[in-house]
Each structure stands twice: as structure tokens, then as C-alpha cells.
């Protein structure tokens, strides 16, 4: 037996604004909210993302980040779509790489990868773990 990720927790300054951005970016929906933050979810087999309030989130480097893969367009078009939702490009000294570093409106960094993957709930890698999403 193994464990499975049920929820991913992201600390942010403004959970409502972050939930609005990530719901639009991932085609998720808001499923719950309380005084600590907002939960968003996609397909029932995907983990829930909890966006919780932490007023000092901008002052701490992220310990994890999301790598997004477009599902119906190329990388450049997806970057433009995300900019339209309020994201910005970020230069962290990454140099000439195949991904684009961005930040959501609250400053949480993420990357947009080059590879196109099927939309949820289709698998984006084989059952044996082979295949990539770069």
C-alpha cells in the first residue's frame, strides 16, 4: 500500500484572490471556504488545493511550486492566457530553459512547462511512471 496526496496546502496573503486565479488557471471550482482560507478542486481524482491565509507568505521562499502543463494550446499561448488572468513573468536567473517562471497575483511562483498534456481526468504519464511533462 501507499499514500496518496489528498490536499496540497499553499500559503498566500489573499486566499480569495488566489482561489480566483487558480480556479481560472486550472479550470477548478471553489469547493469550500472558512476563516482560514479557500479550497478549490478539479476532477474528483485530483487533490484539493487549500489556499490558506498567511500574511507573511511573500517574505518566505516557497518550499514547493506548481509546474503547469497546457492542455489545449502551446506554451506561449498558455503563458499569455495566464498573464490575462493576472500572472506575471518572473526572472529568478533561470537563464535559457524550456519552462517559463511566473507568479500568480499574490506572488506565488509557478512554472509553465513546454509539454502539452491531456486535460483531467486523463492520465498525463503512463502507469509505470514513464513519460515526462517538460
Image (cartoon, rainbow, N blue to C red):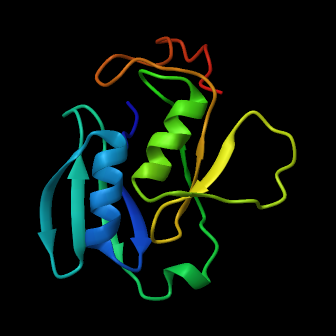
- Dividing the picture into quarters, in which one does residue 4 lie? top left
What is the number of callouts on the image?
0
- Dividing the picture into quarters, in which one does residue 79 lie? top right
Where residue 106 appears, x then y in whole percent? 46, 71
Query: From this viewpoint, is residue 21 visible?
Result: yes
State the residue at coordinates (62%, 20%). 132
Nearer to the camera, 61 or 87:
87
Where residue 35 appears, x then y in whole percent? 17, 82
Query: From this viewpoint, is residue 6 visible?
Result: no
State the residue at coordinates (48%, 29%). 70
- Quadrant (top left, top right, bottom left, bottom right) of the N terminus: top left
Nearer to the camera, 81 or 120:
81
Residue ranking furthest to the bottom: 55
**62 over 111 or under it: above or below:** below
Where residue 80 appears, x then y in whole percent? 52, 42
Where residue 61 appears, x then y in whole percent? 64, 73
**116 over 59 or under it: above or below:** above
State the residue at coordinates (60%, 13%). 130
State the residue at coordinates (30%, 72%). 15
- Dividing the picture into quarters, in which one does residue 50 lie? bottom left
**4 over 29 or under it: above or below:** above
> Image check: 94 left or right of 105?
right
Amino acid at each position: 500500500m501507499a499514500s496518496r496526496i489528498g490536499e496540497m496546502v499553499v500559503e498566500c496573503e489573499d486566499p480569495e484572490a488566489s482561489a480566483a486565479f487558480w480556479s481560472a488557471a486550472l479550470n477548478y471550482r471553489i469547493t469550500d471556504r472558512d476563516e482560514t482560507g479557500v479550497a478549490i478542486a478539479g476532477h474528483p481524482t485530483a487533490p484539493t488545493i487549500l489556499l490558506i491565509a498567511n500574511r507573511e507568505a511573500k517574505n518566505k521562499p516557497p518550499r514547493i511550486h506548481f509546474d503547469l502543463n497546457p492542455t489545449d494550446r502551446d506554451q506561449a499561448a498558455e503563458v499569455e492566457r495566464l498573464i490575462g488572468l493576472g500572472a506575471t513573468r518572473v526572472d529568478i536567473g533561470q537563464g535559457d530553459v524550456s519552462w517559463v517562471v511566473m507568479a500568480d497575483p499574490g506572488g506565488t511562483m509557478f512554472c509553465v512547462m513546454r509539454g502539452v498534456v491531456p486535460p483531467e481526468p486523463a492520465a498525463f504519464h503512463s502507469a509505470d511512471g514513464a513519460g515526462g511533462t517538460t
